[in-house]
Image (cartoon, grey):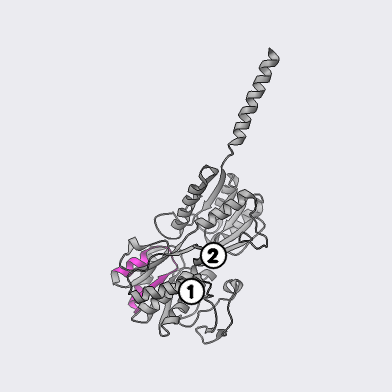
Amino acid sequence: MKTFFRTAALAAAAMVASAGAAVADPVKVGFVYLTNPGDHGWTYAHEVARQDVEKHFGDKVETSYVENVPEGPDSTRVIRELARQGNKMIFTTSFGYMDPTLKVAKEFPDVKFVHLTGYKRSPNMATGNIRFYEGRYVQGVVAGKMTKSDRIGYIASFPIPEVIQGINAFALGMRSVNPKAEVSVIWVNSWYDPVKEADAAKVHIAEGADILAQHTDSPAMLQTAEKAGVHGFGQSSDMKAFAPKAQLFSAVNNWAPYYISQIEAMMDGSWSTGEGPDHFAGNTWLGLADDYLVLTPFENMPADVAAAAEAAAAKVSGGYNIFSGPYKDNAGNVILKDGESYHDGNLWNDMNYYVEGVIGKIPG
């Protein structure tokens, strides 16, 4: 009898263990946010994507995030703590997290790290980005056709490659339809500062700008534009609700397909940062054609301008290389001759100038 009870107990224990094994623990995925998610802008777009991840994977994935993490030493501490908490993949969602992410990745070789939007990689650290500049080219076409003063104001965050790409793409789109128009840039040295953004918008308007663009994350620019009776473009998320009469369209960052694909690759064992034909190999950089960048409806503009915007978006989605010659910088130097074009390496390494149509110089 003792043997029977012992055997039965062992069998019951085995059944419990088997049942436990059948229900696998969810894969933990962490996110690091520069600001709080709110209801607009850069971090909000990432938060929408995180929620889409949860909907897609259900109980197979457990996500968490840390908000309001400054770029610098504080981010190193936060990223390290997420790794210690058992997250198998960690997304760090601001350019200034690049070196901290790389540092922590070396400490936790079994954790997968994905940094947005930098360029440094390691065996367990990939990078991803959206071709934001494609949306800004379309913005430039609209601005060039809409402006009456031939003066456009641009509010920029930091003089890093992705921001400079956007300014130049905007100017190339603008000059393709209006060779007389010019872009004036004000650098606010912040990703998110509504006061600075509103003040910069007021300066642009006072100087005669009747169209405003931005690579900053609050709707303050658009709200200022609406009060002044001028137009502008939303950033990262749809900002129409904040300035329905001023917004021409927003370029919306759609991170969900990227997050889902990276997590799926991690779960099925195909994730890699090595060289290879697939887009998991080190760096993912997609845009309009892949719905990573989505343009909201074209509004507050004449029908012919909307048609031109549609045509520009279709052209870019169809494979047009925005950075194709011939064009010059704003000092008159030939950058690309007819038939020449930039590849991705040029966009990150060689774009240290403004193209024709942009006033001033890039801050040193």
Residue 284: name its quadrant.
bottom right
- Residue 349 drawn at (x, y percent): 60, 73
**Residue 184 in magenta stretch:** no
Q: Which residue is mark 2?
A: 286
Residue type at mark 2 is Leu
Judge left or right: residue 222 versus residue 273: left
**Residue at the farthest bottom position:** 332
Q: What separation in Å lies between label 1 and label 2 (alpha carbons)? A: 15 Å
- Residue 164 drawn at (x, y percent): 51, 73
- Residue 347 drawn at (x, y percent): 57, 73
Query: Is residue 153 in sight in this rendering?
Result: no
**Residue 221 in magenta stretch:** yes
Query: Is residue 257 in sight in this rendering?
Result: yes
Q: Which residue is mark 1?
A: 315
x 39%, y 76%: residue = 143
x 38%, y 66%: residue = 297
Task: State the extent of the magenta-drawn residues as a range.
Answer: 202-226
x 45%, y 54%: residue = 48
Please, what secondary structure does the residue beneath circle 1 have?
helix
**Residue at the farthest right position:** 3
Q: Nearer the viewer, residue 313 or 182?
A: 313
